[in-house]
Amino acid sequence: MSLVNHVRNAGVVGAGGGGFPAHVKLAAKADTIIANGAECEPLLHKDAAVLQHHAKEVVAGILLAADALGAADVVIAIKEKKKRAVEAATAACQGTRARIHLLGDYYPAGDEYDLVHAVTGRLIPPTGIPLHVGVVVQNVESLVNVAAAAAGHPVIRKFITIAGAVARPASFEVPIGISLRECIAAAGGATVADPVLAIGGMMMGETTADLDRPVTKTTAGAIVLPADHPVVLRKLKPATQMAAIGKSACDQCRYCTEFCPRYLLGYAVEPHQVMRSLGFTATGAERFSEWAALCCSCGLCTLYACPESLYPKEACDDSKAVLRELDWKWTGTREVEVHPMVDGRRVPIKSLMRRLDIDGYDSPAPLAAEALTTTRAVLPLKQHAGAPAIARVKPGQTLAMGEVIAEPAADALGAILHAPFAATVEAVEATRIILTAR
C-alpha cells in the first residue's frame, strides 16, 4: 500500500490547527518539504515538546513524506530559542538528508506564506498555496502521525499545551475526545474562579467559557484566563459593537497595515482601507472589501498594532465573508515584492505577550511523563478541513481501539475518524459521536 493510502486510512490531518487532510498534500509533487515547528502562538509549547521527545519520529515522517513527494530539500523549521528541541532534532537529522532551519522568535513565524519565504526565499502567489511554488508544509506532529500511519497506526491521540492561569502549565499526550476540563485538572486546575479558554491560542484561537470542549485532531492547546482579562473582554464583545466602535473611532493611522505580516511580504492587504468599509451603507462595500481578500487573520492588527484598540482583523473577516457570498475572485496583481521594512517590523513574542497582558503567565510547559486517559470521548464529525465525516457506527455498538467510526463521503475532502480506546457507542448525533470506555 502507498504512503498516501496509509496516511488516508490513518486519518492524518494538519495537527497545528489547519486540519487539512495530509494524504491530499502527499499525493502531489514538490521539490521541498518543510516541517513546521515554529509554533508562534504565545504560551503554547506542544510542537517544541514533540520535537524534543519525538524528534526521531518527526524525521522518519518527513523522510517518508519527502519520498512520496519527490522532494530533494527536506527542512525542519524551529525557533532558535527552543534549544532542547533544536538539539534533539539536529541529532535525529544526523546521517539523513534532512536539515534544520532556525527561525527568529517573532509572530507569526508559523504562517505558511512567511515560513515558505523564510526557508526558501520564494513568495507564494496571491490566493495560492505552498505547492504553487513547489513546497509542501506539514506540522511536526502531523509528521509523527505520518510515520505512525506507515506502520498501520491511526490518529487517536493528540499533543496539547495547557497554559495560563493553571497551577502547573504542561504539555500532554491525550486521547482525542477528552474534555479540556480533564486536561486542566491534570495541570493542577485553574487558579482563577471564573476561567475562560483561548483554545488554539490567544491570537487566532477561539475564546469560550465552555471547559467541556473536547480535544480534536487540530487542538494545539488551551490558555486559561480570568473572565475579566482584557483580551477576553475584547474577543467576546458582540460583532455589532466591534463594527460600531471602528466606524466611529478609526482615524486611518495605518498602523494596522504597516504591521500586517502579509502586507510586509508584499501582498495587497491593507486593513486600514477595510476599516473604511464600516462607514458604507448600501453601495461600494465590495470595493474596499478587496483589501481583506489576502488577509491571514493572524490578529496582529487588532491585538497589537491598533493604538485605539479597534477591530481591523474582525472587519477583514467580515469583508472576506462578503466576498465569499459574492463568489468574488482575485483579479489583482500576481507580482509580489517584499517590503523593505519586513525584518524591522517583525513583532517579537515577548513584546506581543506584554501587549496581550499575558507575560505573567510565561513559563515552561514540559511534556508530562505519562499520557492522560479518559472514560468518555466526545468526537466531532468535523475535525478537519472539508466536509464533516459520516458516522459509521450505531448506539450500543462495541468498538476496538483504533476502529473506524466515521469517514468522509466518496470523493469528499475529509478525514477518517477512529475510536481512541476500546469503547461502547453512547450516542450518535448530527455533529458528533460519544463513546464510553469499556
Image (cartoon, rainbow, N blue to C red):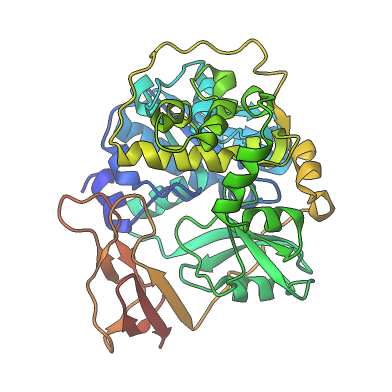
The residue sitting at 51% across, 15% down in the picture is 121
Q: How far across and down, in percent of the image, does residue 13 sit?
A: 39, 50
Along the line of sight, which residue is nearer the eye, 291 or 98?
Answer: 291
Outermost front residue: 282
| Residue 11 visible here | yes
Along the line of sight, which residue is nearer the eye, 327 or 265?
Answer: 327
Q: How far across and down, in percent of the image, does residue 270 sit?
A: 55, 24
Where does the C terminus fall, quadrant-wise?
bottom left
Q: Is residue 373 left or right of residue 1?
A: right
Question: Height in image: 131 above or below 230?
Answer: above
Q: Is residue 389 left or right of residue 232?
A: left
- Counting the numbered discs, the total is 0
Q: How far across and down, in percent of the image, does residue 243 sit?
A: 57, 45
Q: Would you identify the image quadrant in which residue 284 lies?
A: top left
The residue sitting at 47% across, 13% down in the picture is 336
The residue sitting at 47% across, 64% down in the picture is 157
Q: Would you identify the image quadrant in which residue 30 lies?
A: top left
Along the line of sight, which residue is nearer the eye, 337 or 320?
Answer: 320
Q: Is residue 123 left or right of residue 303?
A: left
